[in-house]
Amino acid sequence: MEEKELQKKSYTKVVDYIKHQIMAGQLKTGDKLPAERELSETLGVSRNSVREAVRTLDIMGVISSQHGAGNYVQGNFENNLVESMSMMFLLNQINYEQISQLRLGLEMQALMLAIDHITEPELKQMEQIISQLENVTEENNVILDKKLHYSIAVASKNVLILNILQALSTIVDQFILDLRREILSSEDSRDGLYEAHKGMVKSLLTKDKELGRKSIYKHFALIDEKLKKFGK
């Protein structure tokens, strides 16, 4: 028991050391971590404790372990968010209604920020997506719908909003992809979503935040209506 407690404390010591190195600017994204032996000697812990710390940081998305090449500071937290939220969904701690409510808040803020920060190339890309959405197959409709929302999140220039929305989108794909296709294949909801999407892009072009708000609310009202219909 004492040995396990000691190993736990040692592994925490390694994690804290790496966190402090990152905070101090000694380690940055893309930098390679010191070798296991070096960390072991520097911190006075076993190499098993170092490996346990590396595994933990890898799962958290802080580092990326590359076989035969070492461990690198990565900062890939989206995968960790996806895993955590997926387990919450599986354990019935969250449902799609709650996911939709969170997406509404995040996408609203993403659009408001995008109106302030969007670039000309990003605007042109979104205009192209809207023009393609007019006449597309059901499969391409799903792809373009996701692409538009992703592009708006990118244009917000807020990495945290982007990562969370990407994680939520992945959960939707994992658990209710058929429902998403059903929503986009229904003619009335597809037409309504197209108008909402067109309004969102127009708000970006005209810097009209009120139009942006109305378009986002219209978008999620249509989705929530379908969710209630299908009992999600």
Image (cartoon, rainbow, N blue to C red):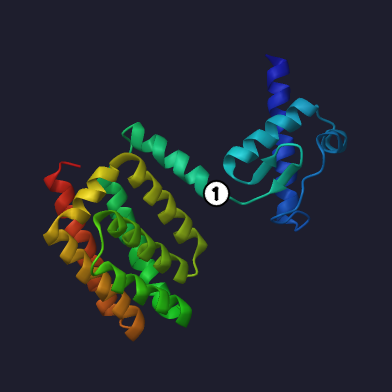
Q: On the picture, is 200 further left or further right than 10?
A: left
Give the residue displayed 85% in from the left and 34% down from the top.
37
Quick one: which residue is furthest to the bottom in this view? 206
Q: Is residue 119 visible?
A: no
Q: Position of residue 101 (x, y in %)?
A: 28, 54
Q: How many marks?
A: 1
Q: Amino acid at mark 1?
A: Phe
Q: Secondary structure at mark 1?
A: loop
Assign the N terminus to one quadrant of the image.
top right
Give the residue displayed 72% in from the left and 56% down from the top.
28
Q: On the picture, is 62 further left or further right than 214?
A: right
Q: Position of residue 225 (x, y in %)?
A: 14, 54
Q: Position of residue 227 (x, y in %)?
A: 18, 48
Assign the C terminus to one quadrant of the image.
top left
Q: Position of residue 152 (x, y in %)?
A: 40, 68
- Give the crowd class for mark 1: few <14, some 14-19, many >=20 residues within 10 Å: some
**Image height check: is 14 above or below 142?**
above
Q: On the picture, is 220 further left or further right than 154?
A: left
Name the residue tied to disc 1: 77
Give the residue displayed 20% in from the left and 53% down from the top.
183
